[in-house]
Amino acid sequence: MSDVLAVGSDGVADRILAGLSRIAVVLRHRGWVDATELGITPTQGQILALLASRPQEPLGVSRIAVELALTKPTVSDSISTLVRKGLVEKVRSVSDGRAVELRLTLRGGQLAEGTSAWPGFLRSATLALNEEERAVFLRALVKMLRTLQEQGQIPVTRMCVNCRFFNPFVYTDSEQPHHCGFLNAPIGDRMLQVDCGDFDPSAEERREEVWISFARKE
Ligand code: SF4
């Protein structure tokens, strides 16, 4: 038996990891190139992109550290630099006068546009998948993100399976079996969100119930 066949299903998992690591290399490299062109570090670029993607959400140092899986001192240092460069400003929280929130300045917002857009080469690589492959890939990604979340490696992600508006498999239509209460409409696996602006977290118990129901149907 060849080595390739002998490794069995664990070999498939290893090859998926190898593929993901290649993509991570591209993203890291691209992050450096893009950030350098903008005169900031990749971490500063990530902070700008996060603030740009959550304009309504009060984000302080701690929350940003959790969202980006960075240490608080790292985030604090980067924010001090961004404030000094006039890209971010600190404002007092309306709900808690002692807390400080971070906002993009006008110039920071303009710069964030350059850091948030997915590079064209990555978009075209994703579009190289046919519709069915994309739906399978998206569902697999949701599963991986959920596992990482359960392990405490990433915070609760703003995706459908964590959202109080999500009801899986309530319709018989196999193309659109789920219901989004926010849209008040059926949605299919192709429409599953992994970073939804309308996300509202569900209680932990409900999250578990939804996941069991979602994951059961393969
Ligand atoms: S609001 Fe967004 S995250 Fe929530 S169920 Fe609807 S599409 Fe999914």
Image (tube, grey):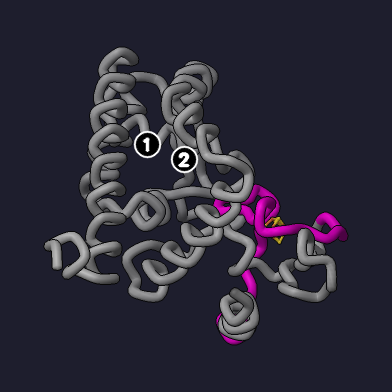
Q: Callout 1: 10 Å neighbours few (<14), some, many (20+)? A: some
Q: For this view, does 163 lie left or right of residue 58?
A: right
Q: What is the x, y in percent for residue 61?
A: 37, 49
Q: Quadrant of residue 1?
A: bottom left
Location of residue 57 in the rendering, given as x and y in whole percent from the top left corner: 58, 48
Res. 124 in view:
yes
Indicate whether residue 196 is drawn in magenta: yes
**Residue 214 part of the magenta segment:** no
Circle 2 residue: 50
Residue 77, x across and y down, in percent: 23, 38
Is the Cβ of the residue at disc 2 closer than 8 Å to that at disc 1? yes
> Tag on residue 164?
none
**Residue in the picture at 46% in, 20% down:** 114
Label 2 Cα neighbours within 10 Å, binned few <14 / some 14-19 / many ≥20: some
Check residue 46 in the rendering and tell me which mark sits there, or answer none: 1
Where on the image, by quarter, is ligand 1? bottom right
The reply to whether residue 88 is visible in this rendering is: no
Tell me the CA gap for discs 2 and 1.
Answer: 6 Å
Residue at x 81%, y 64% (from the top left corner): 181
Where is residue 39, by image quadrant? top left
Task: Identify which residue, 22 or 1, lies in the foreground.
Answer: 1
Left or right: where 172 falls relative to 105: right
| Residue 173 at x, y percent in the picture | 83, 66
Closer-to-camera residue (115/166):
166
Asked which secondary structure carries label 2, the reply is helix
Q: Secondary structure at mark 1?
A: helix
Residue, far right: 184
Q: What secondary structure characterizes most of the magenta part? A: loop
Stretch in magenta: 183-206
